Amino acid sequence: MTEMMRAAILKDVAHFEVEQVPKPQITEPDEVLIKVLVCSICGTDVNVSGTMAYGSKDLHGEILGHELVGEIVETGSAVTGLRVGQRVVVNPNSYCCKCPSCRAGYRNHCENMKLMGLTVAGGFAEYVKTKEFLAFPISQDVPLNHAAFAEPLSCAMNGFSRLNITPGDTCVVFGCGPIGLLFAQLARASGARVACVEIKENRMAIARKLGLDVYMAGPDVKEKLMQKWGRRANFCIDAAGGQLVTAIDYAEYRGTILCFAGPRTAKEGWNFGPIQGKELTIMGSFIINDSMHRAVTVLESGMLNLDPLVTHILPLEELDKGIALMKSGEGMEIIMEIGK
């Protein structure tokens, strides 16, 4: 008899219904079965549930979600590094480890990648299965609501590790969403003077709770920072999207700009001349590349203040509400409680 589980199924634009569906079964010796305890909502979940598609794939009838914390309940015959009962977080991007990108060390650009919650069943369900090498033990001393940050934090740390921020640097973070505020705290912990730029008052208020210097976006912010710091920003991080030209203006000579959120399509009148004139370094960052274990270490250390970022905790049946809160900007980190 087929075992069943509860799962939130995408039925229509931004509309999910909780149904009974077959529980995943281990079919490969290197797989583990995970009971999902919580799964937070990512901006990707908001975007794809609004379009009902990921690329050319129709997502109608699919299970989304990939920012999960769970407990191992079953292991395949070849699994040796994990045990039943362990609490884990999951890298949702399954690499083939064989293609040219994987073999060159760029597994986040795997040519055969499987994406939990997009191309395979996701975490808005009672159970998921994954490969052993994608599940990372995390201490049960870390609150579930903090452990849920493992996936977005590991994405941020993939980009942050390339910046080489050191004490005395100046850093501007554009966007005070969860990712932006993770970046800001990491930069501050590295000794930089940090300023955040945002357009939404509720997110500015959360940044202030974290003790961060935050400004409403406007034409006078750069001058205020130059007066305060005596120079421009050595580092600019675009965690909002579309801020590349503004970041170029804010950046110090030989400064570095990280485009975490996409720069979007170039518009008429955008001036990229200062990239050469100021000898800037501009880089991108894409999902996770061997940064999950470091994210777990950071979470276990307790060095980040995460409580102000969690604005809502909801049951799985209220996933529609969570998606709407994220889309409106009212919600920050929204955590869906699934397991008992």
Image: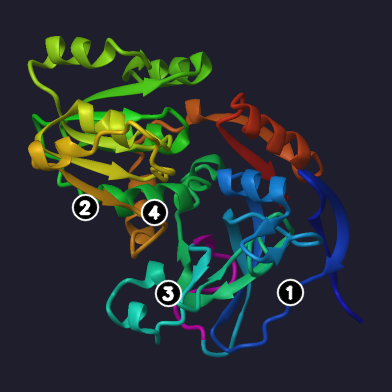
Q: Type of residue at label 4?
A: Val
User: Which badge, 2 or 3, comes first in the chain's sequence?
Assistant: 3
Say which of 116 and 279 sits in front: 279
247 lies left or right of 200: left
Which residue occupies 69% across, 57% down?
53
Residue under numbered circle 1: 24
In the rendering, which numbered label is found on residue 162?
2
User: Which badge, 4 or 1, comes first in the chain's sequence?
Assistant: 1
Would residue 267 be seen by someone viewing this image from the given angle? yes
Residue under numbered circle 3: 110
Q: Position of residue 334 (x, y in %)?
A: 61, 36
**Residue stretch in magenta:** 79-90
Q: Secondary structure at mark 1?
A: loop
Q: Type of residue at label 1?
A: Pro
229 lies left or right of 332: left
Q: Type of residue at label 2?
A: Arg
In the rendering, which numbered label is found on residue 296?
4
The image quarter containing residue 287 is: bottom left
Q: Residue 151: within the magenta?
A: no
Q: Viewer-nearest of labels 4 and 2?
A: 2
Q: Viewer-nearest of labels 4 and 1?
A: 1
Say which of 192 and 340 sits in front: 192
The residue carrying pointer 3 sits among few (fewer than 14), some (14 to 19) or many (20 or more) residues within 10 Å by Cα, namely many
User: Which badge, 1 or 2, comes first in the chain's sequence?
Assistant: 1
The residue carrying pointer 4 sits among few (fewer than 14), some (14 to 19) or many (20 or more) residues within 10 Å by Cα, namely many
Q: Is residue 186 above or below residue 233?
A: below
**Cα separation between marks 1 and 2:** 37 Å
Q: Position of residue 331 (x, y in %)?
A: 61, 28
Say which of 222 and 176 sits in front: 222
Would residue 185 be seen by someone viewing this image from the given angle? no
Q: Secondary structure at mark 4?
A: helix
Which residue occupies 27% across, 44% down?
258
